[in-house]
Image (spheres, grey):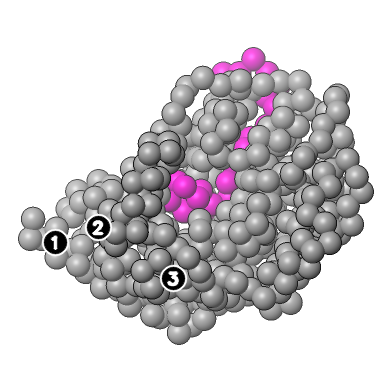
Amino acid sequence: MTHDSASLYARHQAVLPSWLGLFYERPLELTHGEGRHVWDAEGNRYLDFFGGILTTMTAHALPEVTRAVAEQAGRIIHTSTQYLSRPMVELAERIAALSGIPDARVFFTTSGTEANDAALLLATAYRGSNQVLAMRNSYHGRSFSAIGVTGNTSWSPTSLSPLQTLYVHGGVRGRGPFAELDDGAYTAACVADLEDMLQQTAGGVAALIAEPVQGVGGFTAPPDGLYAAFREVLTRHGILWISDEVQTGWGRTGDHFWGWQAHAGNGPPDLLTFAKGIGNGMSIGGVVARAEVMNALPANSISTFGGSPVTMAAGLANLTYLLEHDLPGNARRVGGLLIERLRAVSAGLDVVREVRGRGLMIGIELVRPGTGEPSPEAAALVLETARERGLLVGKGGLGGATLRIAPPMSLTVAEAEEGADLLADALRTAQQRWAAA
């Protein structure tokens, strides 16, 4: 770490919270980026396989987005939702049409946390209940209400909550009491668990909130169709389905534009939340809901910064680029190649338990060799070693033992192969160090 970097780190520690975690023993200051690469303050170049937590969706310094931001900022930066906004209406129209939700309404926020908070407010107000179903191992943000539906203890600092939350099985296919069942039996067991859980409530549960692929949880997912099977039960009880698409939206999984479409057998969700990639780094989040749910709030509400002209201009330009260049299709094709390559390089490495995911949303779960126990130490080692070789990845899952790989969706085949080679080297290094220990 250079003197300047060390000084900045000391200043960070002096004025920012101790719980505001940083990657790496020598934290990085990223100064600029282009395409799928970023540079740090020391001039080192990295292939970016994490995109600022799945947020740089199209590319770093995408000209279409930076131009839209600059042009809008040159006209007016801020107005608030108390005035008509052409870019907000235009982006809402496009998202409503893409959502799959009939008679959809869109409310813009500034983050995924705030989007999920708003969805919980809408669902509980509509149903007149503060009871919520959530998935085990889930993560929905860091606000007070979002933490109250987070089933991952690493990200849940308090048990206090305005909600009564009940957690059901299904989000983690490869672990837990039903892991050894085949997909059909697994789904049936999870549905039976849901039915049993509903017998424990006082009635009138507001909603189920679920990530189609659990993000912070380590890119775990149920079998396709599980939430469709849940939906049949929920509908019978009048319970709403909130699909948290903050990480799975916009074609990231390759096979579908939204994660919920892998579970579409009984129709779309009642509410859908989004954020991260749509702004390509600009602060955009939001909720899509059918009109009767969205319009159910019995009081006035606004958003000072949600739907700001500059962020909406960025979102429009970014979404246009994504669709015109078929980046969801690229995520399917290049992501498919990448996951197969990673499975091949992981074969024979005892430190790797599983390579999972779809599209450009890939998790590599690391364990203590011979035990199957998650190894956050191995993940930290691979994270550091990959960085030394010029590759940035993320981590999550149980105890932080899963590497999270989510590059910009414009990733090329050559870059996927380069990243797989760098990661293979880092994984082999971790394996050798474990063997030596």
Which residue is denoted by mark 2 in the rendering?
Answer: 381
Up the image or down, 119 lies above or below 127; here it is below
Tell me if I can see residue 94 in this picture: no
Q: Amino acid at mark 2?
A: Leu
Q: Amino acid at mark 1?
A: Arg
Q: Amino acid at mark 3?
A: Trp
> Is the residue under label 1 in contact with that under label 2 (CB below 8 Å)?
yes
List the residue tagged with mark 3: 39
In the displayed structure, 361 sits above or below 122; it is below
Nearest to the observer: residue 241 or residue 160? 160
Task: Answer whether residue 433 is magenta in the image.
Answer: no
Q: Which of disc 1 and disc 2 is earlier in sequence?
A: 2
- Against 350, residue 308 (above or below) is above
In magenta segment, residue 220: yes
Q: Secondary structure at mark 1?
A: helix
State which mark lies toward you, 3 or 1: 3
